[in-house]
Amino acid sequence: MALNKEIVIKEALKLLNEVGIEGVSLRALAKRLGVKAPTLYWHVKSKAALKNEMTEHILQPVVDSLPNRNVDQSWQEWLIHVLNQLRKALLSYTDGARVVAGAHISLNMSYVMEKAIRTLLTAGVSLRESRLIVLTSVHYTLGHVIEEQTPPDTKMNENFDMERFAKDHPTIVAAIEEYFNSGRTADDIFNDGLRLIIKEKN
């Protein structure tokens, strides 16, 4: 089968899922594809270009499923739905959020943000506030997923004195227990954070 950009990107994403972003390099990808590095450069000129192409692929499902806001739907509810789709797309690949956050420019992300800003505008939000709400909520989503996709250091956990931490930071511990003891989940904490950003009324 002749090598083309689609094959290169799909193989890069498979490599990403296996070894994470730190293990994805043009050299490793060329070896995996059984080609010399110069052959690969015909399709991707640099690791930055590769990361951009991977980003477009990761975000394509968000673009493909991006809905219009229903007339009986608040813009806040619509935006929360879109950002949940973004989070889902990022979580579908190992280090997906780090790949997207590190991309220099993404036409798919630009498409999502353009539609989001325009949707808020049509709902009566000012241009400046629309942009800031969308930008902040996208940054929040990327940061949240990066944290979700960063595994804890097992050695640090083994040496962590939870009893002493609870004694020194009782308010933090009480807040965490209050939140999760009421049955809330990791999905809830993501959405509750979004609601603070967009000021959705309960």
Image (cartoon, helix red, strand yellow):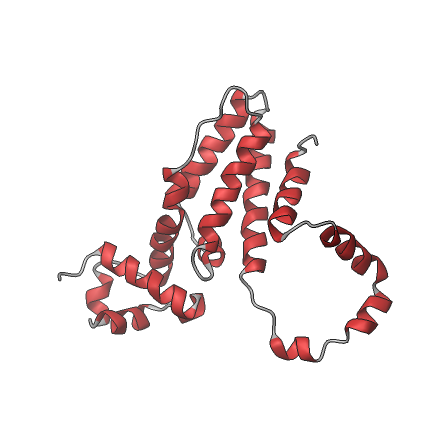
Q: Position of residue 109 (x, y in %)?
A: 43, 42
Which residue is rendered at x = 42% and y = 51% of the image?
A: 104
Look at the image and tell me in which quarter the C terminus lies: top right
Which residue is rendered at x = 86% and y = 68% of the image?
A: 167
23 sits left or right of 81 in the view: left
- Comparing 20 with 185, the one in front is 185
- Comparing 85 with 147, the one in front is 85
Residue 141 position (above or below residue 154): above
Q: Quadrant of residue 27?
A: bottom left
28 sits left or right of 185 in the view: left
Residue 61 position (above or below residue 53): above
Q: Position of residue 50 (x, y in %)?
A: 34, 58
136 sits left or right of 182 in the view: left
- Comparing 5 with 63, the one in front is 63
Look at the image and tell me in which quarter the N terminus lies: bottom left
Which residue is rendered at x = 47% and y = 61% of the image?
A: 95
77 sits left or right of 89 in the view: right
- Comparing 124 with 155, the one in front is 155
As drawn, the residue found furthest toward the left would be 1
Q: Position of residue 92 (x, y in %)?
A: 44, 55
Residue 34 position (above or below residue 127): below
Q: Position of residue 71 (x, y in %)?
A: 51, 19
Which residue is rendered at x = 80% and y = 69% of the image?
A: 165
Residue 61 position (above or below residue 173): above
